[in-house]
Image (spheres, rainbow, N blue to C red):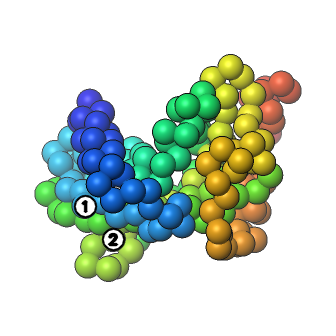
Amino acid sequence: MNVLWRTLLVLVRARRLLRREGPIDPNTVARLRIRVLPTDIDLLRHLNNGRYLSLFDLGRWDLLTRAGLMSAMTTQGWYAVVAAETITFRRSLELWQRFELETRLIGHDDRAVYLEHRALVKGEIYARAVIRARILRRTGGTVPHDELFAAVGRPEGLPDIESWVHDWAAGSSLPSTKRPAPSVWS
């Protein structure tokens, strides 16, 4: 439940910044300050590995809202879903520790957009996640990128996606929902 409250606070802050300062460039590295709360930790008294991804959602809400993408997507009846994600841990975040969450759009291909999240303490990376997200219609189906960029504008200067990200996306994908995906252990 506390991530729901944090999400609402991030959305209120992001909308206020959007009204006050106007939309940010989608290529901007968005930053949030977060503190590890008692509801975030596990028995070892550090940030639970599953909680990182929940907290990284806050960075996506912030970036999409402040860039003006969220309102455009809402108007069009679109929403984003995470299709794949991977996270790497370097150091633990402890109870009550403050960290900075950086979020950045790192590119797109013909079916998805890619974002990177970093948890930093004093400029040092403690954890990093790469997210593959798809934009879907509330009425069903995927939003093609030409339609997405026609509605929200194509960010200029997006870097090419590193080849390992494409390899990861291909290697971690599951069959489409229109094809069977039985659980068979070999």
Is any atom of residue 185 visible in this view?
A: no
Q: Label for residue 71?
A: none
Real-space Cα separation, disc 1 to disc 2, in angstroms: 10 Å
* Neighbour tally class for label 2: few under 14, some 14-19, many 20 plus, Cα within 10 Å: some
Query: Hey, which residue is sitting farthest right in the picture?
Result: 179
Query: Hey, which residue is sitting farthest bottom in the picture?
Result: 123
Tell me residue 29's x, y (percent): 44, 68
Residue hosting label 1: 33
Tell me residue 186's x, y (percent): 80, 39
Q: Quadrant of residue 38?
A: top left
Comparing 106 with 122, the one in front is: 106
* Neighbour tally class for label 1: few under 14, some 14-19, many 20 plus, Cα within 10 Å: few
Q: Is residue 164 left or right of residue 39?
A: right
Q: Residue at x 65, y 39 (%)?
A: 135
Comparing 114 with 94, the one in front is: 114
Q: Residue at x 36, y 52 (%)?
A: 18
Number of callouts: 2
Comparing 166 with 95, the one in front is: 166
Q: Residue at x 72, y 72 (%)?
A: 160
Badge nearest the viewer, 1 or 2: 1
Provide the secondary structure element on which disc 2 rests: strand
Tell me residue 66's x, y (percent): 41, 53
Provide the secondary structure element on which disc 1 rests: strand
Cβ–Cβ below 8 Å for labels 1 and 2? Answer: no
Q: Is the N terminus in the top left, top right, bottom left or bottom right quadrant?
A: top left
| Type of the residue with mark 2 | Leu
Mark 1 or mark 2, earlier in chain: 1
Q: Residue at x 43, y 47 (%)?
A: 65
| Type of the residue with mark 1 | Arg
Q: Is residue 88 left or right of residue 184?
A: left
Is any atom of residue 1 visible in this view?
A: yes
Residue hosting label 2: 120
